[in-house]
Amino acid sequence: MKNKISKSLLNRIKLANEYIKFAVKHQIWGEDYGTPSSSWVSVKEFIAPIKISPTGRTVSLKYKLPYDGDEIRNEVFYPNKFDGEGEIRALINEVIRGIKRGAKEEGWTLTHTGTKLGKKK
């Protein structure tokens, strides 16, 4: 039996992939502060768009931590088994926010409407 990922999560993944493609094309790293009160910035260099397995049972995200060598990390999530869709949605929101922050550092303003990415420098 095939597990289905909700349409809203699929649309969010599609939007995140637009951000990731933009980041890869313009060599922008995603920035993350960990917690709102933290001043320590960690960065991620995204390698490829988020992938969904043909069965819809796994969602994977590939990236590198630029200050931690050239090792490519591959995080795999299971939307209908261990990781709820809410957890994956939070991860995707973090990816989008991080790329927006990294783009802002490079002079870009990124916005979106639905699954369309708007960019301005």
Image: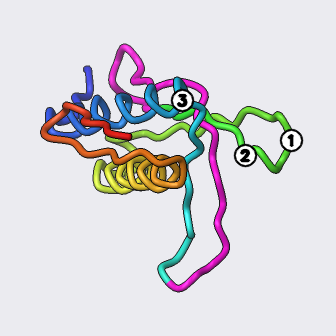
19 in magenta: no
Main SS class of the magenta portion in the image? loop
Instruction: Kindly identify the residue that appears in the image at 64 percent across and 66 percent down.
Output: 41
Relative depth, front residue between 94 and 74: 94
Q: Tell whether 63 sits left or right of 110.
A: right
Q: Amino acid at mark 2?
A: Leu
**Label 1 sits on what residue type?**
Gly
Q: Which residue is mark 2?
A: 65
Q: Position of residue 43 (x, y in %)?
A: 64, 53
- For the record, the magenta segment spans 37-59
Task: Give percent across and percent down for residue 109.
Answer: 35, 48
* Residues marked 1 and 2 touching at CB (< 8 Å): yes
Is 38 part of what is drawn in magenta? yes
Is any part of residue 50 visible from this angle? no
Q: Look at the numbered discs 3 and 2 and tell me whether their residues touch, using CB distance below 8 Å.
A: no
Crowd class of label 1 (few under 14; some 14 to 19; many from 20; radius 10 Å)? few
Nearest to the observer: residue 60 or residue 48? 48
Q: Residue at the bottom extreme? A: 37
